[in-house]
Amino acid sequence: MARKSRERGTDNVLADLGFEDAEELAAKATLALKVNQILTERGLTQVEAAELLGMPQSKVSQIKNYKLQNISLERLMQALVALDQRVEIVVKPVRRRELPVIAVTA
């Protein structure tokens, strides 16, 4: 029986699934995860969170449910700042065997 060749995946499942904006979606998901962790730790309702973050409750709901297509990276970063977090963006050249990429850690 012949073995099937397997395509090697990346570190980004969204890219492996064919999303054109996979890097941006992964960055948004990482930031949203951090926002959600903080909101949960503080025990805030969506209405309380909306007031604190300066956004409509419907946007907080989208973040809570990881429906991030209509949420910008900037809005997520502003939400983290409103939650007393420091957000840093670092730009550096790629090394030899690296690919240019957008990577977010939280």
Image: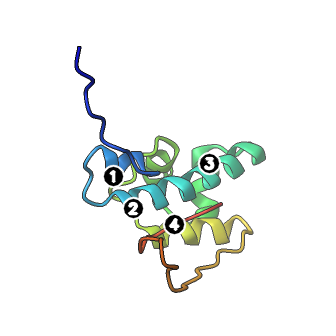
Left or right of 45, for residue 96: left
Q: Where, quadrant-wise, is the N terminus in this rendering? A: top left
Q: Quadrant of residue 90?
A: bottom right
The answer to whether residue 56 shows anywhere in this view is no
Q: Residue at x 64, y 43 (%)?
A: 45
**Alpha carbon distance from label 4 to label 1:** 13 Å
From this viewpoint, is residue 96 visible? yes
* Mark 4 / mark 3, whichever is N-terminal: 3
Outermost front residue: 1
Distance CA(mark 3)–CA(mark 2) = 20 Å
Q: Which residue is mark 1?
A: 15
Q: Is residue 95 above or below residue 105?
A: below
What secondary structure is marked by label 1? helix
Q: Distance from label 3 to label 1 (Cα)? A: 23 Å
Question: Considering depth in this image, is 25 or 32 the residue closer to the camera?
Answer: 25
Measured Cα–Cα span from mark 2 to mark 1: 7 Å
- Judged from the image, the secondary structure of the residue bearing numbered disc 2 is helix
Q: Is residue 31 above or below residue 47?
A: below
Labelled pair 2, 1 in contact (Cβ < 8 Å):
yes
Is residue 3 found left or right of 72 in the rendered image? left
The residue at the point 39 percent across, 53 percent down is 68
In this orientation, which residue lies closer to the viewer: 49 or 68? 68
Query: Tag on residue 103?
Result: 4
Earlier residue among tags 3 and 2: 2
| Neighbourhood count class around disc 1 (C-alpha, 10 Å): few under 14, some 14–19, many 20 upward | some
Residue at image coords 41%, 75%: 100
- Residue under label 2, please give it: 23
Where residue 73 appears, as percent x and y from the top left, is 45, 68
Residue 4, how many percent across, how many down?
A: 25, 27
